[in-house]
Amino acid sequence: GSILKVETETKDLVQMDKDHLWHAMHRYNEKASPMIAAEGKGSWFTDTKGDQYLDGVSGLWCLNLGHGRQEIAQAAYEQMMNLSYFPLTLSHKPAIELSSKISELLKGSYTTFFSNSGSEANETAFKIARQYHSQNGNPGKYKFISRYRAYHGNTFAALSATAQANRRVKYDPAVPGFLHVPPPYSYRSPFGENVENSDLLAAEYIDQVINFEGSETVAGVILEPFISGGGVLIPSKEYLTRVAEICKKHDVLLIVDEVVSGFGRTGKMFGFMHSEGVQPDIVTMAKGLTSGYLPLGATAVNSKIYENFKENGKLNHFRHVSTYGGHPASCAVALKNIEIIENEEIVKRVSELSESTLSELYELTALNKVGEVRGIGFLYGIELVEDKKSKTPVSDEFMGSVIGACKEKGLIIGRNGDTVPGYGNVLIIAPPLSSTVEDLHFVIETVKAVLHELC
Ligand code: PMP
């Protein structure tokens, strides 16, 4: 009886879903049924059919502490009961405490503007950067440089910084003033095969573009420390150090997008901390800031920028507001999330456990179709190719069969979409940072079994 009931309920939900719910990255498929999640615990969730899966991509790389942390739910509950909503045109305690905590974590003196998502955090960064230069006597500095393959969000300016053709072609023209440069990607170096210092050449390219454009026209460079959605690209540590120097030389703001890499994903609190001498002008955050329990975006600026906005003159008025940005419950959740990350030494744990995970995954490069395995912390990319010599990307269908076979075995993994048309060939694995050793073992063994069978 109860099995029949579950089936009927699921069928109804499937039909309602098909009729009324417009999915993210939607591609209509009459035959396919959506996977409808019912409940989650730790790194695992169960769908409405009762099948269990390990979420090897942490939702959308945000569920860093996994499902079901009672302390986090409690923090939201208490905050909602105490002060359900309050705007940040005025102030409230959770936002004050969180802004101060973020400054401490960034190891500098930072001031934070709160929003609701990573896209908005980046939009905010662009507006701050343009206004900063404008009121600093450089109104011509308005252009932003980002890297091909980067993803920075779905809103118009963030999408304009996003340099993946297929995400943009139907929505262009983009916002004016966004330029793109090659990413650091030694496996497919844009500077030719077998060049030794490909990553540093990619950094120098930014210097050249700023020179060609005229540094008096460039406001900022935005980058992820490690391109994640664009195919998990892990440059040498010197790359970011060099980009930071170049930015400084040209009075161009360095905007580091830590939406994915922030809060421990890479084995440091922030991804930029892997590179020496880098202290970003602006840091954007979302996802891991709350471990996905509630939406929250944050744009932290250093004191050089904030000082410029401090005077009371009309010029310095930052005309930017978000109704829900810095919602008291989201801030309370973020504070609790950070408290857990610190108390449970999550960042250290990720750093330690990543070594053995990576070395197990590296073994896969022995297979024909595994072109390269890349990773840092709990963020892994496996680039699949027809053969090692040609490096021809495997087909969409092949990627689908690998991901499908993992799903059959109870593991959800992701891929990089078609970052460059025809190049959606990187498997992405990013389990919750709280995954147990057994969870990690399951991830590794499942991926290994599937790739050994198919590659
Ligand atoms: N920046 C990066 C690096 C991202 O990966 C994402 C989301 N995947 C965003 C920004 C945008 O975040 P959101 O989806 O919360 O707007």
Image (tube, helix red, strand yellow):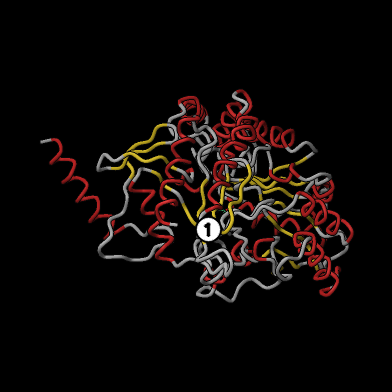
Q: Is 355 placed left or right of 24 in the picture?
A: right
Q: Position of residue 350 (x, y in %)?
A: 60, 34
- Identify the image quadrant of the N terminus: top left
Crowd tier of the residue under label 1, counting other residues whose Cα lies within 10 Å: few below 14, some 14–19, many 20 or above: many
SS label for mark 1: strand
The image quadrant that residue 51 belongs to is: top left
Residue 315 visible in the snapshot: no
The one nearer the camera, 390 or 298, is 390
Circle count = 1
User: Which residue is pictured at 19% across the width and 51% down the height?
Assistant: 11
Q: Position of residue 211 (x, y in %)?
A: 86, 71
> From what the image shows, is residue 387 above or below residue 84?
below
> From what the image shows, is residue 209 above or below residue 436?
below
Q: Is 207 placed left or right of 150 in the picture?
A: right
- Identify the image quadrant of the C terminus: bottom left
**Extreme left residue here?**
1
> From what the image shows, is residue 273 above or below residue 392?
above
User: Which residue is pictured at 71% across the width and 51% down the height?
Assistant: 256
* Mark 1 residue type: Val
Q: Position of residue 428 (x, y in %)?
A: 52, 52
Q: Is 453 placed left or right of 217 in the picture?
A: left
The one nearer the camera, 139 or 245, is 245
Residue 117 visible in the snapshot: yes
The one nearer the camera, 191 or 249, is 191
Q: Position of residue 388 (x, y in %)?
A: 57, 63
User: Which residue is pictured at 31% across the width and 54% down the height?
Assistant: 34
Q: Is 173 placed left or right of 128 in the picture?
A: left
User: Which residue is pictured at 52% across the width and 29% down the height?
Assistant: 79
Ligand 1 contact, mark 1 (Cβ < 8 Å): no
- Give the residue pinned by disc 1: 426
